[in-house]
Image: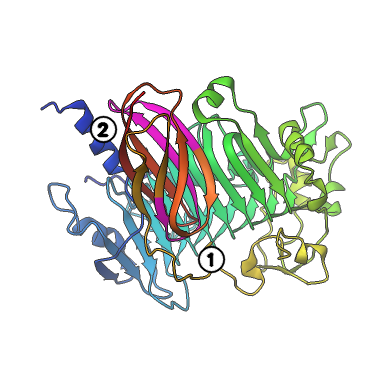
Amino acid sequence: MEIKKDTKHKVGKTVQCFSVFLLLAFIATTSINAQRTVMVEEGVGTLNDAISSDTTATGERVDSSTVYVLSSGGTYLLDGSIQHRDFHLTIVAEDDAAEKPMLIPAVDNGGESSRAFRPRGSLTLKGLYVTNEDELGGVNDRIIRISSDDVTISIDDTHLDKSSQSAFRVDGENVNIFLTNSTVSNIGFTSSPDNGRGVDDRGNDIDTLWLENNTFYNLTSQVLRDDGGIIKYAYINQNTMVNIGKNGAVEFGSVVEAHFTNNMVYNGSFYGYDNDDDPIAVVSLDSLSENDISEFGAQSFTLNNNNFYTSPDVVSAYPDTVEQAVTYNATVQAYVTEQGSAPTNLNEAVVFTDGPAQPANVVTAFWALSEDPPSFPTAGEPFDFGYAGTFSSSTGGDEGQQIGSLFWHGGIFISNEDESLADTPTAFQLKGNYPNPFNPSTNIAFDLNEPSEVSVDVYSIVGQKVMTIPAQRMSAGQNQSILLDASGLASGIYIYRVTARTASNVMVNTGRMTLIK
């Protein structure tokens, strides 16, 4: 099948310290307080036109906080990729939509179509169905190709379906990806199984990767594919992963801090591996280099309360030269052993309420080098990945909850918010540091309106990063603080950046402090 290409759309010196303030000020909160909404009619190119018409000839936005609202069950044929630059684009379904609006690539007069999104600015999608299969059945290669540095992609309650290569391809550095309460399905072709990836970092560094309460099924390769970049923080929690194919279900690569918890991994890396090759692991991790540790701090990794299971029907399809994938590589195994978390992880044959067929015939064709292998099982879609309360997995979570996406157990959507408290702030607010000036330590104070992973970066006055305090989980509340010990720094003025990450937002604030020794 031919892979389609994008349709193109056109769209004096300063003082160093001032430049630093501009740089830090640019990294602002991704929370959107909508001032303007645009209801978009369904049709061919209507969404493309609505977005482009809100950009002036000089490239300025009519209103940078515009939210584009799509009608329940509406069909929106995309006239080329939706591409935006240097502003936060937000597209959502209308409130209480009974059916997800559908975003489908249109085919132009030359028979070409394009991937759905190529963002060069932050992007928020909520309540949508987005496919890379065009109106005539051709399939494009990446649903969301992230083509700029320092952007945040926030996807909630959205179905990303059908792509020949990946759901997310990362071409920029220090990108944040938040995927919650969503589905990613049918990525890759069995005739080229290396290409079916959920998130493909392409060797670029990722700042935050947050995957929570999602369902991934029928990916011919991996949910996460590492190609050499560093992930500073990864949180993969409460996901269901079914029929994940060839190269290990989750390949973290080099990660500074990561958590893999409460996940259902069913037929993960189900192709197995040739016993003349190195083993393939369902979950793998690389240790940080000495240079990485010097820059980011020591590595932290936790893995607990998951269910890893591969169907005997799949294993019986292996020829004698093929072995079943191991659950962990050596680095992951070392962490699991050190933490004593092995007993929390299950190997249980749950039966889904209405799941896809086992891909045994796909395995047989793959190892027979068939030039025309069968496709992944899709008969019966939409599937239901719930399972009965009689299975151990139904209470196997770290708080006694079901393992896997909770959506299939009562339609639960994870918000990561604690119950409202009278003293809970209404916004993230930096309150400065005390004492200031200081020697050698100071407390950085702030309010958190919701539980967050909070980190601190410190910069010299000329913009060089000189110190990082790794992310730590903190509860919502007033007058939270992090102790900063600057014993290793010289006297001077420094800029510090406090980043608070939740499942749906990255909130950033900056302050100025003076160290006197």
Which tag, 1 or 2, sits closer to the chain's start?
Answer: 2
Asked if residue 141 shows in the view, the reply is no
Res 123 visible: yes
The reply to whether the magenta stretch includes residue 458 is yes
Q: Amino acid at mark 2?
A: Val
Residue 491 in picture, x, y percent from top left: 34, 23
Numbered circle sitting on residue 297:
none
Q: Which residue is mark 2?
A: 20
Characterize the magenta stretch by its predominant secondary structure: strand
- Residue 110 locus on image (x, y percent): 34, 50
Image position of 355 (left or right of 14): right
Of the pair 68 and 44, the residue shown nearer to us: 68
Q: Which mark is residue 418?
A: 1
SS for dot 2: helix
Question: Residue visible at 44% across and 67% down?
Answer: 423
**What residue range appears in magenta?**
446-469
Choose top left, top right, bottom left or bottom right for residue 328.
Answer: top right
| Residue 16 lies in the magenta stretch | no
Label 2: how many Cα within 10 Å (few below 14, some 14–19, many 20+): some
Q: Residue at x 34, y 50 (%)?
A: 431
Q: Quadrant of the C terminus?
A: top left
In screen coordinates, is 54 left or right of 327? left
In percent of the image, x 37 and y 60: which residue is there? 427
Q: Quadrant of residue 498?
A: top left
Say few, some or many: other residues with alpha carbon within 10 Å of mark 1 (under 14 / 14 to 19 / 20 or more). Answer: few
Where is residue 168 shown, x and y percent of the image? 49, 46
